Image (cartoon, rainbow, N blue to C red):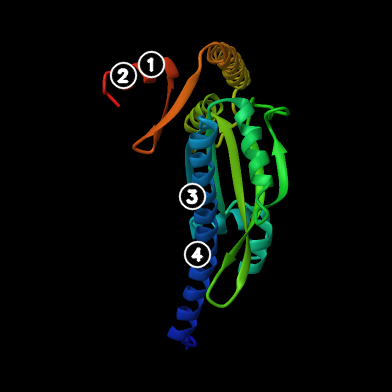
Amino acid sequence: MKEELEINPNHFKDRKKELLRFLMGYKFALEQLKTKIDLLKSEFKHIHDYNPIEHVTSRVKTPESIMRKAQKKGYPLTLESIRKNIRDIAGLRITCSFESDIYVIHRMLEEHGDVNIIEEKDYINNPKGNGYRSLHLIVEVPVFMTDREQRVLVEIQIRTIAMDFWASLEHKIFYKYNREIPEHIKHELAEAAEVAHMLDKKMEALHTEVNLIKSNHEEDEEVETIQINDEQFRFPVAFINRLTQVNWM
C-alpha cells in the first residue's frame, strides 16, 4: 500500500507569500527607476529645452520564465540563488533619439547616489556578432519594505530608435526558432544592423547641424522663453513687443 502524502496548507501559504515578496521587490525597484527617469525627462524638457528620451518600457519576468532560466543555467532552485545569479528578472528599456543621448542618460544615472551601477556592457562601440547594438547596465536599487531594506538588481537597456527597431524585428523573425540560422540570413541581418547604425550617425549629424544653425540664428536675434500651460515656447523679443503694443498679451 502506497504511503499517502500529507499536504500542509500553511506550508504552501508561506511559500506563496515568500514568492510574492520576492517579486514585489523587483516591481518596486522598477517603479523607483521609472520615477527617476520621469524626473530626468521633466528636467530636460523644462531646463534644457530638449528631451532625449522617446519612451520607456519595463517588465518583470514571470515565475515560469525565472525557473526555466535557472534550470538552463544550472542554478539551485532557491530564491537566494536566483536573486544572486539571475540579474535580469527586472528589466527597464529606455529608447533615445540619438546615440549621444544614451551616454548622457548613462552619466545622469551614475550621478544618482542611490543607483549603483555594478556592471555595464557597451554593445554600441562593441556590437555583438549578429550586429546587435545597445548599452546594457546592471544596477542595484534600494527597496524599502515594511520590515527591511533590500538591494535589488535591475537590468537597464538604453538604445536608439533605430537600434530598437532592428532588435525588435530580429527577435520577431527568430521567435521560437530553435534551429541553426543559415549563414546568408546571419549576413543579411548584420548588414541591416549596419544600415541602422549608419542611419543613427546620419540623423545625429543632421541634428547637430540644425542645432548649430538655430544657435547662430538666436545669437543674431534676441529670444525670450514664455511658459504657457506647462509648455515652453521661444519667441523673438521684437515679436513679443509687437503683440504687447496691440494688446494681445
Q: Residues within 10 Å of mark 2 (few under 14, many from 20)?
A: few
Mark 3 or mark 2: which comes first in sequence?
3
Disc 3: which residue: 59
State which tag comes first along the sequence, 1 or 2: 1
Q: Which residue is at 47% across, 87% downward?
A: 6
Tag 4: amino acid? Met
Q: Of the residues tagged 1 and 3, which is closer to the observer?
A: 1
The answer to which of marks 4 and 1 sits earlier in the sequence is 4
The residue that label 2 is drawn on is 245
Q: Amino acid at mark 3?
A: Arg
Q: Which residue in the protein does label 1 denote?
A: 239
- Residue 192 % position (x, y): 57, 18
Name the residue at 49% across, 28% down: 169
Where disc 1 sits, the SS reads helix
Q: Are marks 1 and 3 in contact (CB under 8 Å)?
A: no
Q: What whole-number distance in Å separates the C-alpha atoms at marks 1 and 2?
A: 10 Å
